[in-house]
Amino acid sequence: MKITKENLDNYEVALTVELEADKLATARKTACKKLANRYNFPGFRKGKAPQHIVEQQLGKEYVMEEAADILIQEAATDALKEEGITPVTEMKPEVITNEEGKDFVFKVTFTPYPEVKLGEYKGLDIKKTVEEVTDEDVEKQIDVLRDHHATLIDTDENAVVEDGDFITLDFEGSIDGETFEGGTGKSYPLTIGSGTFIPGFEEQLIGTKVNEEKDVKVTFPEDYHSAEYAGADAVFKCKVLSIKHRQLPEFNEEFVKKVSKFETIEDFKADIRKNLEAGAKRRAEEKQHREAIDKAVENMTVDIPPVMIENRISQLINELSLQLQSRGMTFESYLQYTGYDMDHLRESYREGAEKDVRDDLLLETVAKQENIEVDPKEIENEIAIMALTYRVTPKQIVKILKENKQLSAIHTNVRRRKAMQFIIDNMVKDEEEAKKDSKPSTEDKNIKEDTKDAKDSKNNKDTKAEGKKADKK
């Protein structure tokens, strides 16, 4: 097999492959056997028609085309392995020479996996900054909890809308004097300060009485989900129908006992602080890990074929479509609701898609560089987790993945995750972590103590045994 590689425009590569004439003759026989099983030939049982009959009935040219397909499938795979190339697009085959007695020549064109030059990805010095939890943070968390347990109380006829109140209202919106779709509501429930409506809307209702009418003037945000209203000035004619104040429970030991397992305010606050500190630490670690991956991506060099980004955008849109279907919404109605067309939607995904592709290229290359392998048990665990998430059996998950040709993606995801963990594990550790790692763990201590106990026990047994021997003597 002779292979000639040619770099084309638009990141594509062409491999021209030449195979000896005898390879074509063998493929021709194989093609006839396959065709004999596929078609019925008068006077012969299925699969038993000889080569000359098959070629006579179907035509030699048809058989040669079938033989070419067989050769291309086998030889293209071998050529890719020999050249060490992984395609990221489907190969487009082209037969150049397919004649009896001559070498078979074909060409495949595709976009290859880009060359990635890793920079520094081990020993990254990324500082972890954990936000301090203050008394004010604890009090805010208590306020959130009190608000969650608030009760709504009716107001008298002189009450006015206050921040935090629960109200119902009628409204009718117009732009340039014309009402618009979605701009009208009857007995609409609204919590003032919730941010449910356009910025500036809810604040203007503060001070309004029941049955009082008020014109609320707002400007739709420039990034509003419906493009036709983005940046437009609107007027909403509003009428408040009812007002209910939110009454917060008093923060005392009775409240603490009601909402928690604690008996005292001090223990309750200590637990809140502990949880806030754990959250702060977790966020700091997540941020540090993300910055480590970003730094490793920044340090690598790669020229990404645009088709990889386009493919990732298509994948993200397919995922969105599936999510919408699970909620009973069609993709077309989503586009209509958001005011997007397909081009606009694809463009909105571009930045995130490029980041995803860069991350994947980094992790794939690190996994290859560090010989990171995936154990079958890890695949089983991943499938088991998916089964629990979707409340189906692992066998059903495997069936779905096979039907969608996504089973290999599980292996890829696990391998990339292990590569990510490799980068994280090899970061420069701060003094606190270094000290923690230098101290023997509880498990290590237990192992040492168990070993010591075992040795002491053995020594005691040996001493007793020696004593018995001495007695016998």
Image (cartoon, helix red, strand yellow):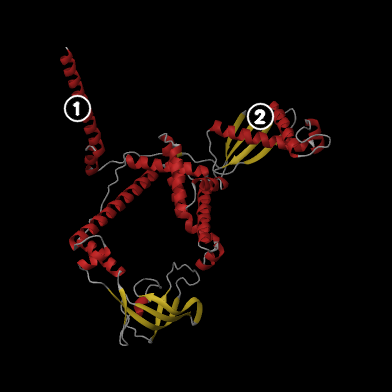
Horizontally, residue 59 falls left or right of residue 434, namely right
Horizontally, residue 157 falls left or right of residue 66, namely left
Q: How many numbered circles are shown?
A: 2
Which amino acid is tagged 2? Leu
Q: Secondary structure at mark 2?
A: strand
What whole-number distance in Å separates the C-alpha atoms at marks 1 and 2? Answer: 74 Å
Q: Position of residue 459 (x, y in %)?
A: 19, 23
Q: Secondary structure at mark 1?
A: helix
Disc sitting over residue 19 in the figure? 2
Placement of 337 over or under 305, stated as above or below = below
What residue is drawn where x is 42% and y is 70%? 221
For the residue pair 162 and 99, the one nearer the viewer reads as: 162
Q: In this view of the protein, can residue 301 be seen by the observer?
A: no
Which amino acid is tagged 1? Asp
State which quarter of the image contains the N terminus.
top right
Placement of 371 over or under 295, stated as above or below = above
Disc sitting over residue 456 in the figure? 1
Query: For residue 207, which quarter of the picture?
Result: bottom left
For the residue pair 359 and 119, the one nearer the viewer reads as: 359
Query: For residue 141, which quarter of the picture?
Result: bottom left
User: Mark 1 Cα within 10 Å, few/some/many (few <14, many 20+)?
Assistant: few
Q: Earlier in the sequence, mark 1 or mark 2?
A: 2
Q: Position of residue 307 (x, y in %)?
A: 53, 48
Q: In this view of the protein, can residue 202 be seen by the observer?
A: yes
Horizontally, residue 394 falls left or right of residue 239, namely right
Of labels 1 and 2, the one closer to you: 1
